[in-house]
Image (cartoon, helix red, strand yellow):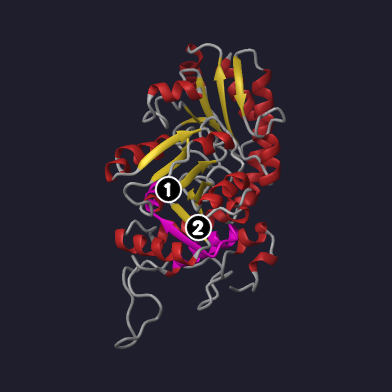
Amino acid sequence: MLYGNAKQLSIETKAVHGCKGCDPQTGAVSFPIYQSATFRHPGLNQTTGYDYSRLQNPTREELENTIASLENGRYGFAFSSGMAAVSTVLSLIMPGQHVIISDDLYGGTYRLFEEVYRRYGIEFTYTDTSRIGEVERSLKGTTAAIFIETPSNPMMKVTDIAATVALAKSRGLLTIVDNTFLTPYFQRPLELGADIVVHSGTKYLGGHNDTLAGFVLVNDDSLAERIKLIQKSEGAVLAPFDSWLILRGIKTLGVRLEKQEKNALAVAQWLRRHEKVERVYYAGLRDHEGYEISKRQASGFGAMISFSVRDTALVEQVLERVRVIIFAESLGGVESLITYPIVQTHSAIPADMRERLGVNHKLLRLSVGIENVNDIIDDLDQALR
């Protein structure tokens, strides 16, 4: 690493400069895209350190080391999507074992667990992980891991990571944290004792809605070896060009998130005053149930807001009328995006489970971008009018 002990640097600086700072061979400030599937051996039983890009590629390696540095972790692994990263983590669970999962979670994750991994004899229990007592009551003799989203998607529940880790360690379980919404810029679960951190790098880490990516971060040597084996064997690795795009996106992570969070707080405060809005879910509001926990375990609240309107008819009206805000799936990019979870991101969740959580026909989810906040608010105003 160019800068020695990276922990001595602020996260803003680490994000800008990455792991090596520049290409050590050429001095290129923008780390090169090594668009090569294979690498020449100097001789028999000799290697440059790179043999085949499914095993390792210099561009992907720089990205993996950069995200590990940002999380203050030892090992990073980059995948072709966030779901590929989550799938790799689930591959660590054995048939007959049990996993406790946040009941409020991304629908694609639920679909992966239920329609793919349950067939392999893995049992799942969905519970409110923001209430540690509920997690404890869900424990079984076969429980192997606790998987949490915090803040959760889309209801923005906040789980106490340290308390979950303490419970998990007392039972010899893994704690897995999806850190997509806050990124290591605002929250670093490994520092709180989590065993595994996953990200959809497609979102805030890339930041420009132009590529798919996923990450797994760990500190444990044994876990790292197992994940490395799965990564190279299954081959869902991130391509060199996509690795470069995420590296480029990470350079502006700090300034983007600071702007997005500032915008999100203003939008959330405006929404809760609107006569046609029933309820606003944003962890940065002082009366949010998880506000104090967020302050303890994170340095920011992020830029994801969900809100319910008073009349279901308003949903279609808003989605058709927004102009600055884009009606599209995904989140975390510089553009503000609005989605309708019940028919888009969370359609795979059973109806009774969605209804219990509040993911109903009145709920919209807003990913706040970096536009002028007055333009965002004006757009919502005319769409709700």
Q: Residue at x 34, y 64 (%)?
A: 232
State which quadrant residue 17 falls in: bottom right
Cα distance between the residues tagged 2 and 1: 12 Å
Tag in front: 2 or 1? 2
Determine crowd level at label 1: few under 14, some 14-19, many 20+ residues with C-alpha closer than 10 A.
many
Q: Secondary structure at mark 1?
A: helix
Taking the magenta stretch, the answer to whether it contains residue 126 is no
Q: Which residue is mark 1?
A: 82
Please identify the residue farthest to the bottom as the structure is shown: 43
Q: Quadrant of the C terminus?
A: top right
Position of residue 22 measured from the top left corner of the image (x, y, whole percent): 56, 70
Taking the magenta stretch, the answer to whether it contains residue 68 is yes
Q: Residue at x 50, y 57 (%)?
A: 217
State which quadrant residue 281 falls in: top right
Q: Is residue 62 above or below residue 316?
A: below
Give, as a single range, the part of the protein colored magenta.
Answer: 59-88
Count of picture labels: 2
Position of residue 317 measured from the top left corner of the image (x, y, whole percent): 49, 16
Q: Residue at x 39, y 58 (%)?
A: 238
Q: Looking at the image, can residue 298 be seen? A: no
Label 2 amino acid?
Leu
- Residue nearer the viewer, 204 or 290: 290
Q: Secondary structure at mark 2?
A: strand
Label 1 amino acid?
Gly
Q: Main secondary structure of the magenta part?
A: helix
- Residue nearer the viewer, 323 or 112: 112
Q: Quadrant of the N terminus?
A: bottom right
Q: Which residue is mark 2?
A: 217
